[in-house]
Amino acid sequence: MTSPDQPMIHPEPEPRDPAEGLAWAEHTLASLTLREKAGQLMMPWVLGDFAPEGTASHDRMLGYIRDQGIGGVIMSVGSPTEVAAKLNDLQEHSKLPLLVGADLETGAGFRMRGAIQMPGTIELGGATDFPSLMAVGAAGDAGLAYEMGRVTAVEARAVGIHVPFAPVLDVNNNPDNPIINVRSFGEDPAQVAALGAAFVRGIQENGGIATGKHFPGHGDTDTDSHTALPIINHSRARMDSIELLPFQAAIDAGMGALMTAHISVPSINAGRGDPSTLSAAIMTDLLRGEMGFTGLLFTDAMDMSAIARQHSAEEAAVRAIEAGADVILMPPSPARAIDGIVAAVESGRISEARIDASVRRLLEVKADIGLDENRLVSLAGVYSAVGIPAHTEVATRVAERSITVLRNGGNLLPLRGTRTARVLSVSYRRESDVLAGRYFDRRLRATYPQLTTASLTRDASSDLYAGLLRQARNQALVVVSTYVTAVSYQGSMALPEELTDFIGALEEGGIPHIVVSFGNPYLLTSFPDVRAYMLAWSGSEASQTAAARAIFGDLEITGRIPTRIPPLYEIGDGMTIPAKASANGR
């Protein structure tokens, strides 16, 4: 018997005969009615909030499980323990084990970490939140990509999520892309392929099902598929050499799932303009036939306008199945989607054998990850596997290795850090991003006790900018940090004109200043004469802290941009700035 000071030793489980899982899948498939089979193909959205029995939220999910027989859910935001408890509850109510997916592009913290404002900001903590994938691209280290995938899988499985919808394998070669941006590893297809394959192995070798997205490639678009249907008018040869390359590498690395893109690519769809999600030429002939993909095929969210504006819930689901999809993700109405599939089989439009093929694939995956034997997770285990220091240290390494400097006029960086200096820190953020600047300013204030801070949103008045400019003239340094990723915001530029004018006025007035982008790297084109420009790639705590440490010379700056910033910079550009000789620890 172990003492309280000794670790509990758990024996390794006996290896399972794969034939047992296959037998379970076949037996289960044979027991299902046509409607139950169709239900297995549905994966509706669920919020990770506290939803007691008898509430509308709880009853809605029970209706999906009991009445529609859904095969899985896509989990949204919540705390790690609440997500785990909620998924256990849903699993216990379900006749068959549920397959659970979630968008975990930057780790489990992408959905399970946050803060509330009441009115003060209270950090809630949560799972490990990594910098963006483009930060991994700036670091250029496949080992870090693997570790990010590994930590993502371990934390996802600990809370009951089996399918992290990651990594993004889109090649972001269009600076005007409003939806991908820093979600991509970068612009070089070979680098995206190498880092993506490493990320895939990290997930797959640690219990998760890696899901590459958004096939056949959403990087070269200037339209958001949430609002309209993007069209890519590139030749098949071009698609093979750029967009499809990372997906093929990930498939070869053993990727278990793939998510479609609601984009139109006529060159590989016989000249037709249908969304790829609804195209058999793309999803079956190309993906499964030519590229050899044998895993699960998820649609992107079916409530997005690129699909929902064109087809009813019934017709969209039927067309996606005809195209080759296995899972209908976030259907506007699961019941109507099921009705449509059942009616299509009964009318002879789709064969029942086609439905069986997808259900069999789903059941085999569930068995392969052990859900037929144990579908629940230990709530106590969440505390020993999620957001632990060993995992957040990996996020720190990614952040520190990713810091990139493109401009350093007058060798402004690293800063001297004179404690008596008067410094102004101006943060531009989304209204809802209550943690933007919190960790960055915390580190600045540790060196500059007299630090003055200002937080701006899109609604900031011109008078406020004018006041900040007057204040800036009395400062030794102004640090402007931007926490935006999209190229456009509701039809306008990502940064308001008032902010770019403010930055321009700092240069014209000879005021020492630094701009740090915690997201979109392309913002530099709006103020190309800025004194110093640093890229930190995301607003995560790790990135904010790393950027502040880099400013003071606490770490060596070695990042290189994995994307062009036309017409100013090319892939691979970036300065090496040594750490200060006196830098020690964190």
Image (tube, helix red, strand yellow):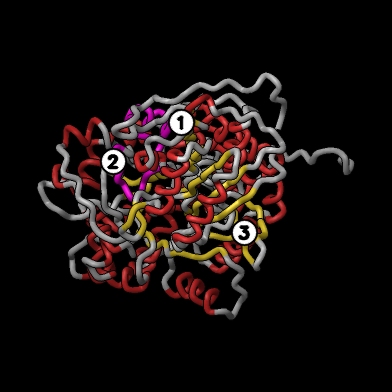
Which quadrant of the structure image shows residue 86?
Answer: bottom right
| Residue at 40 percent of width and 51 percent of height | 495
Foreground pick, 310 / 35? 310
Query: Is residue 72 visible to us here?
Result: no
- Per the image, label 3 sits on a secondary structure element best described as strand
Which residue is identified by label 3? 115
Q: Is residue 417 left or right of residue 368?
A: right
Which quadrant of the structure image shows residue 458?
Answer: bottom left
Foreground pick, 185 / 280? 185
Range shown magenta: 173-200
- Per the image, label 1 sits on a secondary structure element best described as helix
Among the two numbered marks 1 and 2 on one chain, the one whose residue lies closer to the N terminus: 1
In this rendering, is residue 390 above or below 128? above
Which x, y percent locates residue 14?
63, 39
- Per the image, label 2 sits on a secondary structure element best described as loop
Mark 2 closeness class: few <14, some 14–19, many ≥20 residues within 10 Å: some
Which residue is identified by label 1? 138
Foreground pick, 513 / 361? 513
| Residue at 50 percent of width and 40 percent of height | 516
Which x, y percent locates residue 182?
41, 42
Query: Is residue 517 visible to us here?
Result: yes
Q: Quadrant of the C terminus?
A: top right
Q: Is residue 251 left or right of residue 502?
A: left
Is residue 189 highlighted in magenta? yes
Measure the alpha-carbon separation of dots 1 and 3: 28 Å
Measure the alpha-carbon separation of dots 3 and 2: 33 Å
| Residue at 48 percent of width and 36 percent of height | 510
Label at residue 174? 2
Count all numbered tags in the image, as a single digit.
3
* Type of amino acid under label 2: Asn
* Type of amino acid under label 1: Ala
